[in-house]
Structures are given as structure tokens and as C-alpha cells.
Amino acid sequence: MSFLLKCPNCGERSVYEFRFGGEVRQRPAPQAEPEAFVTYALYKRNIAGVQWEWWYHRGGCGEWFKANRNTLTNEVHQTLLPKDEEQRG
Amino acid sequence: MQQPQILFEWNGNSVTAKPGDTVASALYRSGVRIFSYSYQYGRPRGLLCLTGSCPNCMVNIDGVPNVRSCTTPARSGLSVLAQNQNVYRGFDSPAVKRFPAAPPLSESEHHYQHAYLQFDVVVVGGGRSGIEAALASAERGMQVALLEKQPALGGDSVHPMVTTFLNCTCFGLYEGNLLGAVQIDYARPNAETLLHLRAGSVVVATGAYETQFLFANNDLPGVMLSTAVLRLLHQHKIVPGKRAVLIGDPARCSQLQAELEPAGAEVVASLPIGSVVSALGDDHVTGVATATVTYDADVVVMCGPLVPDLGFLAGTSLESVSLVGAAAGPGLAYIPPPSAQSTDAIACLCMDVSGRDVAETIESGMGHIELIKRFTKLGKSACQGRMCQTAAVSLCGQVSGQTIAQVGTTVARPPAPPVSLGVLAGMRHHPVRRTPMHYQHDRLGAVWMDMGDWKRPRYYDSAGTRNQAQCVEQEYRAVRERAGIIDVSTLGKIEVKGSDAGRLLDLVFTHTFSTLPIGRVRYSVLCDELGTILDDGTISRMDPQRYFLTTTTGNVDFVQQWLEWWAAAGGFKVNITNLTAGLASMNLAGPLARGVLAQLTDCDLSSAAFPYMDWRQAAVAGVPATMMRIGFVGEMGWEIVVAAEYGSHLWDQVLEAGASVDLLPFGVETQRVLRLEKKHVIVGVDTDALSNPYEAGMAWVAKFDKPDFIGRAALLHMKQNPLERMLVGFEMEGSIAPPDGSPVLVDGKPVGWATSVRFSWEKRKVIGMAWVTPAEAKHGTPITLRSDAVDYFANVVEQVFYDPSGQRLKM
């Protein structure tokens, strides 16, 4: 794995500067059944294709951001800070 | 001018080399013909390709095995050893396999480095085509890297935009046009640099390698590829033999004849491949036999099939690179089959797989090229299939009646060629973090222990007795009876501030912090969504919108990223700053601690003015400090936090102020005993990656009076359901402390393990904590700890071992 990832703050960098943070998921409402939390915490969709995921720029600005990546090709289509969610393509 | 003489050792004998010689060429010139013995049958092997493609010339140089002597420049002082010398030599007899003697892995001489570089264009291969491509790109204003595995380019490439890397072998092309290459500095032992080259585009000019023909005894020393003969002639001015037989394409044979004869070698015959039945000879070739004629010869040259050298592109699509020169040539080509009498031909030199082995494998039903590889081991060793792939594919195609394309090739993956593990590992990076008081500890006789990157005093051995038990007891008694001080600067320290700071901490911690009064400190636990304990620490509210957190020593980066992730995901308006390196902190504890601290500050330290779990800011020893009244070790105490720059000053001042009451500094080992008597859990020592607060005996941390926090649903579920295991205290019956981690047994069956076992001076017994099933958690239950097959008996103790009511904390 050696693709480049574009940090919204720092620009395009080697993926080794980043920590992978998993799929972007919706946390259940606080009143949800325990089963919903188990599903949320443990059952990943593990998509073979394009998904939104969290990345952390550990070796740079120290910011969490979201990336739209093809898990088969490691092509990264878009990255954005959570506050710029409306720009999601 | 006279060139300095190059002298090196070959199997203990001195060999002279000329400038420009490789180890292989110098050995050949000095008369060496057998360079190695084969791995399986111990067959003698001589120079074959001389281009770093075959396994034959691999030797042990200065203790490093499997070094190709044909690409290693000769250098004075080298110690070169042949490999596999002592195996039984016989083709059909059972082999006595001896692996190359493993050299001692030297700690001393190696210079492994990594370099990270970016270029517009990277050209792999510095022959004519590579140089042309490099110059063309440079003329267009691009930054170009030119990589050549040999010590010299095949021409002139001087251009300011071209950076040339010699002795540099590219072993893989990875995602994002990342090229891995290893550059060797032959002037020093084991000096290799791993280049991480990020390329705008990649030009492949690696040329083609030549591969061998199949006939009996095709692996005899003296049977060479034309590349080796040309290199010996042109680069090293060595005539490889007196009488040569050439085999292969007539046009290439006659070209070679035109090179050999002026140099003084007689060409006895040029034969088409199909006519050759066998090379003759025992330890070296003496001739060639066809079905009808025998030719005497001391060198046999194969003008073998040329295959583009694209090994390092394994696993990538060729569309992303430009191929130039011979690398762009046709792929594998059929080579004629060995005749019926010549199935003894060696197809795979590395693993001694014969043509017959391959044919029999196919006949027994394993006709797929991948099956042939797996069954025979053909192509699985040092040459990575260069010398055998063509033969295997040809044989497979001919037996099964398929074309080359239908047979296909085995799946390859980088690195190709092989890379030393040392250079992948790179330089030794063992960063060491030292607290601001490190050298004070050193002068006090600290015996060090590693905690992550940090150095911490395990205990202080001022008298140099190395008697840990005695030192720890003295430190223990100081804290319990008088006063002690411990450096806790390694604990993580994080500031969380902003209008949503309280709301964020309410979400991630089990307690509520938005209502914590300013001036108060609270201990809390961080859980994940499954209720598993991630970390623990104290949280102090400094301002309405500012909190100060401590974490365990190894976890600060994780906690910071955890907080930042929830802040980012929830859109919290907070700033999270890791202050660990900027602050020094120390814990002053003991019944006489108040008197010591009072000498250094005007702050009112009485319990009325400064109660347990409060913090105050005041000058201490003349420097601004935050004092938190907390008690991990179970005595009245203050954690004093100052700027890192003031750490050593404050430490000295506390020791001076404490001298009158015989205050002692104490280390981690003493702290572990003190806190164990209080059954204070250390996250990561007494808990593991599955522990939750209910099992760890900390049910009180789960606060369900707020509607939501991370792990609430899971903790609520645990509260309402039986536990699977519990962390309990125990007292040993005997005086021996089995090691931490010893299994716990009941009726001979394992039920858990002990996490911490120490001698308690309070109880005058060995005490500890252990994970057991709930059935054993009752006070007085007998349990057994087992260590080295010896059983030690203990009883579960429900109460805290020291000061159960906690009154000593609040004095």
C-alpha cells in the first residue's frame, strides 16, 4: 500500500503519514438497543469498492478528515474536513 | 601511475584483482572455475550469466550469505567464501543437505539507510536506451533519476537535470508510482540505502536477460551464456577459454565468433540447439556431444533466448510505464525440448529441478504452470525464475500441446530481485524520552526501566547494592511513614478547551464533567462502545471552558486522537492540545508531605482549604505550579505540575525541604506495591483489551445519570447481566511471589491469571490481583497460582489491603 492521500490541510502525502480510522458510520441514537451498538462497533460493511472513511494526519497537521476511496484500486476520489460535509460529491 | 593492488581472500587463499574487477572476474582470472555447489545435489557450478541474473556465482562475503560476486566490485580485505561446499555430490543419490552456514548476525558494521525522493521521471536501467530516454526528458526540463544496477553507465549521461544512481537495483513498482530501489555503497560493509522514489512517470530500460538451453549437463562449469562471455571479453579483458563451442541462433553465434577469434579463442563449432545432446566433463566442461559427433572444448557458449527483464514490475499493469530498448522486446519464446536422451538437463539451477522432473510432473497430472512450480520448487529460489521460467513454460507447452500464451507464467510479486532484510528495516531508531528530572534520578542512583519510549526509575539504588527488595522497602517505608516523591512526568497531559469542552468530555468519559466545579479533580475512565476500558486518568476543571486531563504513560497519543475523532465527528467546538512534553510533574505523598510542601508554598494546604480531589494554582519553590490533591499510592499527596523547564529545580527543592523528615524519592516498583495495597488498577497491567469496569471492580465509574456517553448501552447491559470474570485481590499462603501473569487454577482447572503479585509490607504477606471466574470471587476462596510447574496457594481477599476507608488520603 503506497498510494497518495490528499490531506485537506497539507495536500498530497504518502499514505504512511496517516492513520486509518475505519468506515464512516452513523452512531445509533443513545436510546437504541444494545444490539444496535454491537452492530455499529463490530459489524463493518467491508465494501469492495468505493466508500467514505476516516483518516488522521498523524505525521502532519493532526486533523481527522474523510476520504472517498476505492478499496480495490486505492484510488482516492475526494477528501474533505467534516465541517465541509456539504461539499461531498 | 601504478594502480594500488587489490588483494582479497577466497576460501582463505589470497587473490589479486585489477581495478574494475568484480569479485567474480578477479576469481575467474585467477583460475577459479567452480564458484558454488548446488543446493540439492551439490553439483559444481561456474559463471553463467555475469549479469546478476543467475544463482551460480553467489558467495558469502564478509559474513553476508548469497551475495552475487559478479555485481560486487573487488575490494581489498574482502573475505569471500564459497557456499554449500560440503554437500554430497551425486545426481541420483540421496543428498545430504547442508544449508549455508549461518553467519553470526553482526551488531557492529552495517549502514542501512532510507531516502525519500521525488522526480518527474525515473528511468530504470542505464544502458543506451535508458540514457537516451533520460536525456530526452531532461531536455524537456524535467527532473530525471537514472538508476543503473552496475557500477557504471553504458554511456555518457551528463546533464544537470539528470541524477544518476549507480549500483542501484530497482526491486518493485508500487501504487502511486512509488519505486523501491536499493543502492549499495561497496566501499563499506553492508552499506545499503533503500530509495523510496516517487515518480511522475516511469521509463523501464532494464534490457533483457539471457536464459539457458536444455541439454544434459547444461549446468557444468564452463557452459556459459553469451552475456558472460561478452562481459569477460570487453569489460575485464579476459578470454574465457581456448576452444569454444557456440550453441544457438546462427546469426548471434557468428557475431560472437567474430569477437572470440581475434581475442585468441578458437571456435570449434556452432551448433543449432536441437542437435546438442550433452555437455561432457566432470567438474568442468571438456566437450559437447551431438547424436553423431563429439567436439572437444573448454568453454561452451549458449546464445540463449532473451527475455525482457521486467521482474520488478510484477503485480503492476504495464500500461502505467513506458518500456524502451530490449525491455520492450518480445516476451518468452519457445526453446526446443531436450531430446529423449537429455532429460537430465537442469531446468532450475537454484533447486536442481531437471527436465525429467518437470516432464514427470506434467505426466502425473499437474500440468498447470503454478502446480509445476509448487510440486518441483522450480522457480522458487534466488534467481526468481529468470533461468528456469522459459524452460518450464516451454516444457509445459510442449507436453500439453499449448502455446506459450496459453500456458502463461506463474504469478510474481515484488521484490525482484531479492532485497536484504537489513535495508528494509533501515537504521536503528530507538528514540528515548527523558523527563526533565532524568539526570537528577541518575545522580540519585536510579535503576532504569523502559516504559514505551520513556526511561523511568524502577527504584533508586544510592548505595549501589543492587538489592531491589531492600531499596524498595526503604522507599515504601518513606512513603507510608514519612514522605516520598515520584517523577510522574511521563503521564500523558492533555488540555481540552472551547465552548463544547464539557459536552465532549461528557460524551467520551463515563462521568459528567460539564457540571464539575472549577477547582475540582475527578478520576474517570474512557470506554469504547462495547464498554471496554481504553484508558483512565484525572480530569481537572481549570476554567468554565478549559479542562486538564492526565492519561496513562503509553496512551496519550491514542487518547488525544480518540478525543479529536469524536470532536471532529460531532462537530464539537474544542481545541485539544497534548502538553506532555511541555510539563513536568511529580507526586509528593506521605503522612508528612504537607509539612514538606508547606516549606515551599504560601498556599493553604489544610484539608479545609484544599480538600482531597481539589486543585490549586500557586507559586511552589518560586515557580508557578498547579497542585492536584490526589492519591494513587494511598497516602495524602499532591501531584505538582510545572513547566518542564522548572522540573529539575522543583525536584531539588522538594528533596531539600524533605531532608529533615528523611523524604526519599521512589520509583515505579515501589509505586506498584503501594497502589497494589490499595487495589488501584493500572490500565494495561491489570486490565487487557477486553476488560470492562464491572469486571475490573470499578462498577462505580459507570454513571447512568446522563442520557448518553460512549459505552453507556454496553455498560447498562453488563450491569443487568452476569459477569464472565472478575478481577479480585488475593493473599499468598507462602512467602514466594510467582511472576505476574501466572495462571490461576481451581481444582486443577485454569480459571484465570494473576496480573500483579508483590510482597506487601503492610500485610507481611505476598498479595496480588488476579482474573478469576465469578464463582471464585468470594472472600476466602482458595486458588492456586502455577509457575514452572510448581503450585502456590492463595486465598481471595475482597477488601482493600491498606486503609480500606481511605481516611489517610483525606488527613
Image (cartoon, coloured by chain):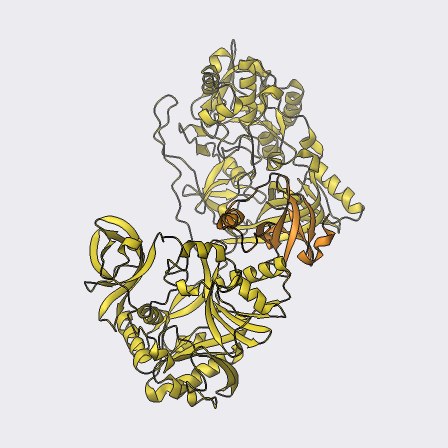
Q: Is residue B539 above or below residue A88?
A: below
- Where is residue B567? Give x, y as percent: 60, 61
Quarter of the figure with the N terminus of chain A: top right
Can you tell which quarter of the image residue B333 is in?
top right
- Where is residue B48? Give x, y as percent: 53, 30
Farthest residue, direction right: B140
Name the colour assigned to chain B in the rendering: yellow
Q: Residue at x 34, y 25 (%)?
A: B94
User: Which of B810/B48 is in front?
Assistant: B810
Q: Residue at x 40, y 35 (%)?
A: B84
Q: Is residue B453 above or below residue A13?
A: below
Farthest residue, direction left: B734
- Where is residue B308? Give x, y as percent: 64, 30
- Where is residue B465? Give x, y as percent: 28, 73
Name the colour assigned to chain A in the rendering: orange
Q: Is residue B149 visible?
A: no
Q: Is residue B608 above or below residue B167?
A: below
